[in-house]
Amino acid sequence: MQPKLSNDRALRIVAAAREEFAKRGFAGARVNQIATRAGVNKQLLFYYYHSKRGLFQAVLAHCATELDGALASLTPPSGGAGGAGGGPLERLRLTLLAQFELLERNPQMVSLIGQGARSGVAFQPAINRLVVLLAEGQGRGQVRDDVDPHLTAAQALMLMVGYLSMEAVVAASARPLGADEPSLRERWRDAAVDLVVAGVRAS
């Protein structure tokens, strides 16, 4: 991060922009509103981030760093089978659970991931963490050789983001799901993780 972007005013702008982009999307977000919420003038905002798009990319980068740091602290360290971290499939399961729970606690991040097409690498750290585990599993013969680690990692993330973005739609899509709505989120999380892990497991 550039030194000028690590001071209090620059970080206040990012925090205000995160809230505005998450609530209104890129198209609906207003730079004037962001500047007002951050307690700065619009000229200072453009000095730091140059444009609305530059500010949006800064918000995504901050979210990506936050997500990766949180996952690093929650995911067990790597280790051989029987080691402290367990094998790659067990660490894949724990990482997926940790990702879901982090996203569940951060609805702004879920909204921003949904807009992340404007910055193709914004959430690459979270996907890369899954890619490494899948590739390691292939090397150990625990994950199917025909699995594409990058595609599978992206699909796993979308199972989580998609549900958390459209929970009400999912609950209303079938009566059995709607009837079980209080525990639906937990059921979805566990089923999604099982689906990914079972789907990649080598026979």
Image: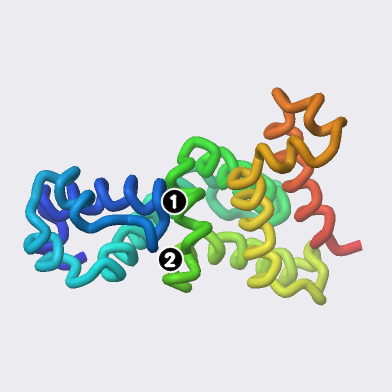
Tell which tag, 2 or 1, sits nearer the viewer. Answer: 2
Q: Secondary structure at mark 2?
A: loop
**Residue at 15 percent of width and 56 percent of height:** 6
Residue 134, label in figure: none
Amino acid tagged 1: Leu
Residue 86 visible in the displayed image: no
Side of 53 where 79 appears, left or right: right
**Residue behind mark 2:** 122
Query: Disc 2, disc 1: CB below 8 Å?
Result: no
Q: How much space separates mark 2 and mark 1, taking CA atoms?
A: 11 Å
In the rendered image, residue 92, in percent from the top left (x then y), is placed at 66, 53
In front of the other: 178 or 187: 178
- Look at the image and tell me in which quarter the N terminus lies: bottom left
**Residue at 26 percent of width and 47 percent of height:** 15
**Residue behind mark 1:** 67
Task: Please tell me in which quadrant of the rendered image residue 48 appears.
Answer: bottom left
* Above or below for 148 versus 1: below
